[in-house]
Image (tube, helix red, strand yellow):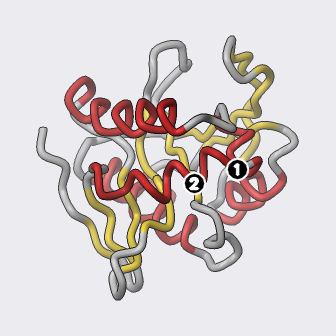
Amino acid sequence: MTPPTLHTERLTLTAPSARHFAPLAEFYASERSSFVGGPLTADRAWRALAMEAGHWSLRGYGRFAVELTETGELVGVVGPWFPEGNPEPEIGWDLMNGYEGKGYAAEAAIEARRWVYEELGWQTAMSLVDRDNIASAKLSESMGCKKDGQFHSPSFGALDIWRHPGPEAL
């Protein structure tokens, strides 16, 4: 599947590609990536980028590279995600270093949620959040999500399930 390009007021959501590697590698080298499997070496960050791109081929959807429309800078990776072992598809988000606190994750996640409801026909969505990741829990709450149990990931341990409002509630 060819990923679509989506637009919000400030952001362009597009297919992950090799041009996104440098900021992604910087993110994965930092402690900020600890909630999503990091820190990682550059070769492991490359594999993470390949996984993001490959998810589109395997599932027909995937997370978007989120760029500032004005500059093309990569600010995050956000969108639908369903790796093997997850209990169901989710909407996930990672923000690159220096872009937190500006509302980019919410803006991109709301657009990604709209897309999965309207274009993929999802009737529900969840986000998995490490209980120590306060910023992601706050983002989930701001998007109208409610805690809906826990999931124990073999890779990430105990994660809170945040249930998004369904398409009929939005």
Residue position marked by numbered label 2 in the rendering: 26
One can see residue 170 in this view? no
Give the number of marks.
2
Q: At x 72% / y 47%, what residue is drawn?
A: 146
Q: At x 58% / y 48%, what residue is drawn?
A: 164
Q: Amino acid at mark 1?
A: Ser
Lateral position of residue 88 relative to residue 7, left or right: right
Lateral position of residue 112 relative to residue 31, left or right: left
Of the pair 117 and 112, the residue shown nearer to us = 112
Residue occupying the far right of the picture: 132
Q: Which mark is residue 30?
A: 1
Q: Amino acid at mark 2?
A: Glu
Residue occupying the far front of the picture: 42
How far apart marks 1 and 2 lie (CA) works out to 7 Å
- Measured as percent of width and height from the top left, residue 132 is found at 87, 42
Neighbourhood count class around disc 1 (C-alpha, 10 Å): few under 14, some 14–19, many 20 upward: some
- Measured as percent of width and height from the top left, residue 44 is found at 51, 30
* Vertical arrangement, residue 137 with respect to residue 68, above or below: above
